[in-house]
Image (cartoon, rainbow, N blue to C red):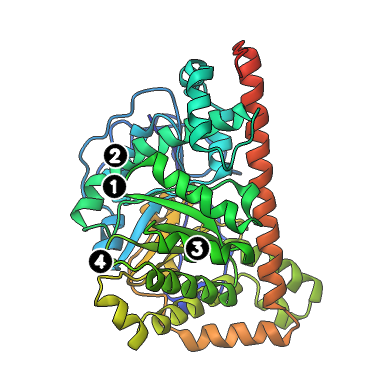
Amino acid sequence: MATISKLSNPSPAASLSSSFKPRSFQPSYLIAFRRPLTNFDATLSSKLSLSTNSPLNASFVIRCSQSDGNGTPTKKTVLHDLYLKGGQSPWYDNLCRPVTDLLPLIEMGVRGVTSNPAIFQKAISSSNAYNDQFRLLNLRKLVSMESMYRELVQAGKDIEAAYWELVVKDIQDACKLFEPIYDETDGADGYVSVEVSPRLADDTEGTVEAAKWLHKVVDRPNVYIKIPATAPCIPSIKSVISNGISVNVTLIFSIARYEAVIDAYLDGLEASGLNDLSRVTSVASFFVSRVDTLIDKLLEKIGTPEALDLRGKAAVAQAALAYKLYQKKFSGPRWEALVKKGAKKQRLLWASTSVKNPAYPDTLYVSPLIGPDTVSTMPDQALQAFIDHGAVSRTIDSNVSEAEGIYSALEKLGIDWSYVGNQLEVEGVDSFKKSFDSLLDTLQEKANSLKLVSL
């Protein structure tokens, strides 16, 4: 069952221009422990309940629990409007057991799920929901799985094989829940993403083999294999796409790297040799909030009034320019030739949409980034804030000239966009590696505590 704590905040401005002006705000009210819902009765499932949160750190959060989590029909929410009127697919950036906790969110309009090593680290290490399956992982089953994964898992790494066994089950179960959306949209939506090992971020061929293996073992039409947009993995993206495997390219922090990701997708489609490209799809996960986190620190070091006035504006400005590039690259003769074979655009996916600075509007990385053929994957905080007071209007390209001005102004102040992109990429890969390694340590501890001597 999903447990929710809610704190309402003032509605942020819907336009791109106003979103470049982050403001401080104070909570307007707090829903106390188990107080009946008011305006949320129409949108939240009866399986959702409230829990207390202090005003200092209260947020609207979905948490995993141990119950079965059945969904019930709900009325239309702003998430439905986001898709039907805004052309943007709302996805949920989280996954844990039981996956049936996703049913209320699907009813509310969520159309896909993203996961990463940090999400699974939190889910598996903080829950007992995985213990039964983990306990049943006997040596024969693990050896069988390792034989499929022989190019990637060396002898003796049974704990890592156990990790993949746990993850694959969650991904398969989630794919089943979203399969109706996948079918209804003819393969355009309803995807669940699973990432290759972050240890392969600098390994071109290893990433290709890992992606092929994951695609084979998950064996669901609506799975996205996540590959990082590191320089060594750009060729991997082309190769995996050329093999007819759908990909979520993750950890994109700069426009230059984003263009390389688009080219890899187009190159892969052209190299596939397929006459029907309609089932090979992709999203490009462009990270936003982390960009402001880093650039704000750089602006504060500069310290001039001009620099300080640009805080909280870099991420959305860069995202608007990324969308401009998207429109340019997916048009013209080259793209039209692929469309004739059924090719679908590689949609821009806005990732890292939660607000890190409490002085900023809590939908800062959602409301200004609404536009056709895009995806917004939202963790608990961003998702519930947008459900609460988000508004749908086309904002992503409503003021591109202002975005260009902000981008240039930052450069004039000495902000090196190449440095920002590279630094955030290093931090992102390192963060996922640490989460992955920490989870393997946790699984070994679980194996020891459960006396699984075969592991």
Amino acid type of disc 2? Lys
Q: Quadrant of the C terminus?
A: top right
Q: CA distance from mark 2 to mark 1?
A: 18 Å
Q: Residue furthest top?
A: 451
Q: CA distance from mark 1 to mark 3?
A: 33 Å
Q: CA distance from mark 1 to mark 4?
A: 33 Å
- Pointer 4 residue: 276
- Pointer 3 residue: 237
What residue is shown at x 39% (from left), y 29% (from top)? 98
Amino acid type of disc 3? Ile
Bin the neighbour count of mark 2 within 10 Å (Cα to Cα): few under 14, some 14-19, many 20 and up.
some
Tag 4 or tag 2, which sits nearer the N-term?
2
Tag 1 or tag 2, which sits nearer the N-term?
1
For discs 1 and 3, the disc positioned in front in the rendered view? 3
Q: CA distance from mark 3 to mark 2?
A: 25 Å
Q: Is residue 121 above or below residue 137?
A: below
- Pointer 2 residue: 176
What residue is shown at x 45% (from left), y 82% (from top)? 324
Residue 82's spot in the image, x, y percent?
30, 62
Amino acid type of disc 1? Met
Residue 320's spot in the image, x, y percent?
48, 77
What residue is shown at x 62% (from left), y 10% (from top)? 451
What residue is shown at x 46% (from left), y 81% (from top)? 325
Q: CA distance from mark 2 to mark 4?
A: 24 Å
Q: Are the two marked residues, 3 and 2, in contact with CB atoms closer than 8 angstroms?
A: no
Residue 346's spot in the image, x, y percent?
39, 68
Secondary structure of the residue carrying numbered label 2: helix
Residue 443's spot in the image, x, y percent?
61, 26
Amino acid type of disc 4? Asp
Q: Are the two marked residues, 3 and 4, in contact with CB atoms closer than 8 angstroms?
A: no
- Pointer 1 residue: 108
